[in-house]
């Protein structure tokens, strides 16, 4: 059991444009939460820091270059999962500075959404929890 992870670390970005809209993407078919909207991000690889993983994932998925200095830790959420697979711990960062324009590099749907619109979307469970917590503090 020593070599098996007790949880999977995942990172996500609350990327907001100057109008205060959030960048979200739809989980692809065959992935966990397929068809639900989520903050962009992904798994942290072995030997990688959460911040470095987030920068890599956002570039791979959406072609954006996040400014590491603009990433602010904004919260975390975890799931209690029983069964063979380990639970997820999701580390959430806020980001208001990046370079590039979003593009669907993995054929996923994406869009910019005002906070009210985000509330009405079918969000993945941990993303809903993080959005609710984070949006309460966003002005």
Image (cartoon, grey):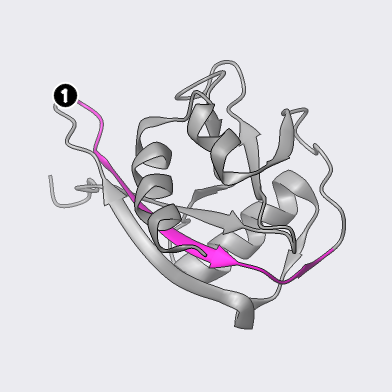
Provide the residue span drawn in magenta.
Answer: 83-99
Residue at which label 1 appears:
83
View extreme (bottom): residue: 69
On screen, 69 above or below 101?
A: below
Asked if residue 16 lies in the magenta stretch, the reply is no
The residue at the point 72 percent across, 50 percent down is 60
Place of residue 96 in the rendered image (x, y in percent of width and height, measured from the top left): 66, 68
Q: Is residue 48 visible?
A: no
On screen, 51 above or below 7?
A: below
- Quarter where residue 55 is shown: bottom right
Asked if residue 89 lies in the magenta stretch, the reply is yes
Place of residue 86 in the rendered image (x, y in percent of width and height, measured from the top left): 24, 37
The residue at the point 76 percent across, 47 percent down is 62
The residue at the point 75 percent across, 64 percent down is 18
- Give whichever of 91, 138 is nearer the camera: 138
- Give whichever of 139, 73 is nearer the camera: 139
Place of residue 110 in the rendered image (x, y in percent of width and height, measured from the top left): 72, 35
The residue at the point 63 percent across, 53 percent down is 57
């Amino acid at each position: 059991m020593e070599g098996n992870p007790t949880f999977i670390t995942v990172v996500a970005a609350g990327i907001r444009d100057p109008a205060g809209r959030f960048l979200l993407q739809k989980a692809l078919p065959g992935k966990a939460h397929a068809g639900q909207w989520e903050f962009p991000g992904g798994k942290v690889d072995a030997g990688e820091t959460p911040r470095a993983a987030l920068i890599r994932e956002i570039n791979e998925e959406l072609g954006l270059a996040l400014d590491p200095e603009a990433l602010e830790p904004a919260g975390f959420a975890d799931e209690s999962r029983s069964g063979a697979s380990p639970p997820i711990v999701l580390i959430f960062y806020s980001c208001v500075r990046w370079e590039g324009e979003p593009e669907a590099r993995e054929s996923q749907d994406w869009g910019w959404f005002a906070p009210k619109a985000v509330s009405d979307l079918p969000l993945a469970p941990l993303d809903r929890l993080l959005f609710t917590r984070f949006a309460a503090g966003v002005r």
